[in-house]
Image (cartoon, rainbow, N blue to C red):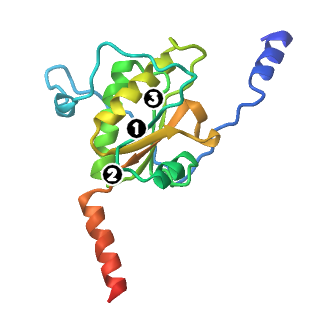
Amino acid sequence: MNLDDKSLFLDAMEDVQPLKRNTDVHWQPERRTASPQHPDLLELDNFLTTGFLDIVPLSIPLEYRREGLQTGVIEKLRLGKYPQQASLNLLRQPVEQCRKMLFSFMRQAGNDNLRNLLIIHGKGRDDRSHANIVRSYLARWLPEFEEVQAFCVAKAHHGGSGACYVALRKSAAAKQETWERHAKRSR
């Protein structure tokens, strides 16, 4: 790398901040695909749609709120006030692999009764960049999960426009646990 290349690189990276490692964040390992003779059973249930995609322009931030969700919840999500319980990194993955990883990740989050997730999809420089294609698919796929209550762009320290926060519906087991905890206090 010559001096001009290095100075151009340093100028381009001037405002970039590294992601902080947080011990509360659980990075999901990439799942190995099953051998062709034994298709992955999870994949048989994968309902995430593929095919024609409406590209979400980079100028439009990712945001979704299921009807009936309180505005205070989406505002706290947008401000990054909920602790991230799990994270999924989709950077530089083929779209089909992202689809499989997201489905598996969301199923595991549901099984673990998680509520707040971080999904890192990357940033593109133009609307047709790979990162924006993945981002556009996320905008389609996340509402397909019944348990997704909302999602929005992450704060800069979690990846900014290259990541999104996802809020999941409380599971029946978690609702019961909350009810029991509050019932004990009122006695």
Decide which of tag 3 and tag 2 comes sooner along the chain. Answer: 3
Give neighbour class at mark 2: few <14, some 14-19, many 20+ (Cα, 10 Å).
some
Location of residue 148 with respect to 31 vertically, above or below: below
Question: Residue lying furthest left in this view?
Answer: 37
- Check residue 144 in the rendering and tell me which mark sits there, or answer none: none
Dot 3 amino acid type: Leu
CA gap, disc 1 and disc 2:
24 Å
Q: Quadrant of the C terminus?
A: bottom left
User: Where is mark 1, residue-wise?
Assistant: 29
Q: Quadrant of the N terminus?
A: top right
SS type, badge 2: loop
Q: Position of residue 153 (x, y in %)?
A: 53, 37
SS type, badge 1: loop
Dot 1 amino acid type: Pro
- Check residue 90 in the rendering and tell me which mark sits there, or answer none: 3
Q: Position of residue 17 (x, y in %)?
A: 70, 36
CA gap, disc 3 and disc 1:
11 Å
Dot 2 amino acid type: Arg
User: Where is mark 2, residue-wise?
Assistant: 169
Question: Residue lying furthest bottom in this view?
Answer: 187
Closer to viewer: mark 1 or mark 2: 2
Report the side of 131 relative to 95 (left or right): right
Give neighbour class at mark 3: few <14, some 14-19, many 20+ (Cα, 10 Å).
many
Q: Position of residue 101 (x, y in %)?
A: 35, 31
SS type, badge 3: loop
Location of residue 186 with respect to 115 vertically, above or below: below
CA gap, disc 3 and disc 2:
23 Å
Q: Position of residue 64 (x, y in %)?
A: 42, 37
Closer to viewer: mark 3 or mark 1: 3
Q: In which quarter of the view is residue 38 placed?
A: top left
* Residue that appears at 50% across and 20% down: 131
